[in-house]
Image (cartoon, helix red, strand yellow):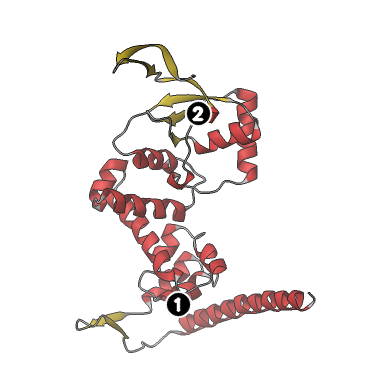
Amino acid sequence: MSGLKKTGYIEDGKFIYEKEKYGEIEIKEIKVDFKKNVRHSYSAQELGELASSIKSQGQLQPIGIDEKDNLVYGFRRYKAIKEILKQTKIKYVRVSFDNLDVVQLVENIQRDDLKDYELASSLSKLKEELKVSNKELALKLNKTEKWIEDKIKHSELIKETASHVDVGTLEILKQFPTSKVNETRRLSPKERVEVLTSGKTQKQIRNKVSSKSHVNVGNKNKTLALQERKYTKKQLESQISEIDSQIATLTAKRKEITKQIKALSKK
């Protein structure tokens, strides 16, 4: 019964053990719900490196568990110690918070290896679960309201685009940083995909978007392109460069699809 004190108290005629605040606990006693984790997958390499570090230096940071032995944070440490090092015990600290999702997210925000979309998606879900404003969420996470707004917008744009692309393309879109995705907020989903997958730099994307001015008509939410302005020679050359880049991308994609067709034909 690791994780429990030897002393306790009597309740309803039964002796109740008190939970230790920290120490070691049997891994088999820990309840894990990876759906609650910000990241849903970890590479074998990063887990291997973490396991190697723990093996040589020991477990420097405890995992966090709640009063019911649910894993709150430290998912990577848990997986490395259980699945790679095959240890039966793990160091822990018992935590108690009003909302455990906030605790998990705060810990993950500090990590450099968390992709922007993973963070943006989790913030969006957390905001929905807590039913709070961007300002309130910013206060909870000790971030600026602008930072929260940018992440939420990132999540919204990817969700908006998801139904217009295949699974492979969606995964590619999820790799782009928040700053780059948000530059396309004024574009349609189709245009967003074309621009992001064209290989353009963030500055080129910004220039592309700024050249597309739109107005809203009445309450129908229809977007009409304004009369095309005259371009300079440099701007026209830039457009040709963009077209060449798109042609190169599409050509590469065509070759890949052709290769897949040939492979299927041989079966």
Q: Which residue position is annotated with label 2?
A: 29
Question: Residue 133 at what x, y percent from top left?
Answer: 23, 52
Label 1 SS:
helix
* Nearer-N-terminus badge (1/2): 2
Rendered image: mark on residue 190: 1
Q: Is residue 115 above or below residue 156?
A: above
Give the Cα separation between the discs numbered 1 and 2.
49 Å
Instruction: State the residue lying farthest toward the front.
Output: 13
- The quarter of the image holding the C terminus is bottom right
Q: Is residue 10 left or right of residue 195?
A: left
Q: Is residue 82 above or below residue 145?
A: above
Question: Residue 167 at what x, y percent from top left?
Answer: 54, 67
Q: Residues within 10 Å of mark 2 (few under 14, many from 20)?
A: some
Nearer the observer, 26 or 256: 26
Question: Residue 207 at what x, y percent from top left?
Answer: 42, 73
Which of labels 1 and 2 is toward the front? 2
Q: Quadrant of residue 229?
A: bottom left
The kind of residue tagged 1 is: Lys
Instruction: State the residue lying farthest toward the top.
Output: 7
Residue at point 47%, 70% (across, down): 204
Q: Residues within 10 Å of mark 1 (few under 14, many from 20)?
A: few
Residue at point 46%, 81% (across, down): 235
Q: Is residue 76 left or right of residue 122?
A: right
Label 2 SS:
helix
Contact flag, marks 1 and 2 (Cβ < 8 Å): no
Does any portion of residue 142 appear in the rendered image? no
